[in-house]
Amino acid sequence: MVAGKSKQWGKPKRWSANARAMWDEHNARYEFNPAETQILRAACDTLTVIDRLTVLLFDQEDWEVVGSAGQKALDPKLVELRMLRGSLATLLDKLKIPNDDAATVSNERATQARAAAQSRWKVAHGAAS
């Protein structure tokens, strides 16, 4: 992946608005080789399915279905949604796109964790704070 603009390979009309936005955003910032472009296309396909499943689930009154033995069970779309979200994360990780926000959040969490640990140490060892 190279910083800069890449040529547009086109967006399928079947993609959700979120997938089309993700395609545009990533292609505006980076130039992908053909293999990376295919990974991004797969990520956009996956995001489209996630968006459609989410709409289906949230339009339902109840997330329980009747199982094969007549028992109540969670709608299998919930499991599929969870698995697709994991797949999307894996695909996006393969692109190795830097996430500036994640680094900032990680640094803030590390600072908070350090302060909490120091506070616990002071309490445990009788040091004045």
Image (tube, rainbow, N blue to C red):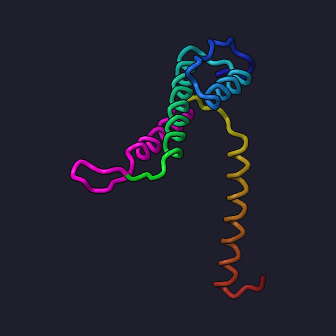
> Considering only vertical position in the picture, is 116 above or below 54?
below
Q: Nearer the viewer, residue 77 or 31?
A: 77
Q: Nearer the viewer, residue 31 or 48?
A: 48
Residue drawn at (72%, 61%) of the image: 111
- In percent of width and height, residue 93 lies at 56, 35
> Considering only vertical position in the picture, is 81 above or below 33?
below
- Tell which residue pokes out farthest to the left in this image: 69
Residue 128 left/right relative to 99? right
Q: Is residue 68 magenta?
A: yes
- In percent of width and height, residue 13 lies at 59, 18
Residue 91 left/right relative to 64? right
Q: Main secondary structure of the magenta part?
A: helix
Residue 13 left/right relative to 103? left
Residue 66 left/right relative to 4? left
- Tell which residue pokes out farthest to the front in this image: 61
Classify residue 122 by image quadrant: bottom right
Q: Quadrant of the N terminus?
A: top right
Q: Quadrant of the C terminus?
A: bottom right
Span shown in magenta: 65-93
Classify residue 121 by image quadrant: bottom right
Residue drawn at (64%, 84%) of the image: 124
Residue drawn at (52%, 36%) of the image: 50
Label tally: 0
Q: Is residue 27 magenta?
A: no
> Considering only vertical position in the picture, is 43 above or below 76?
above
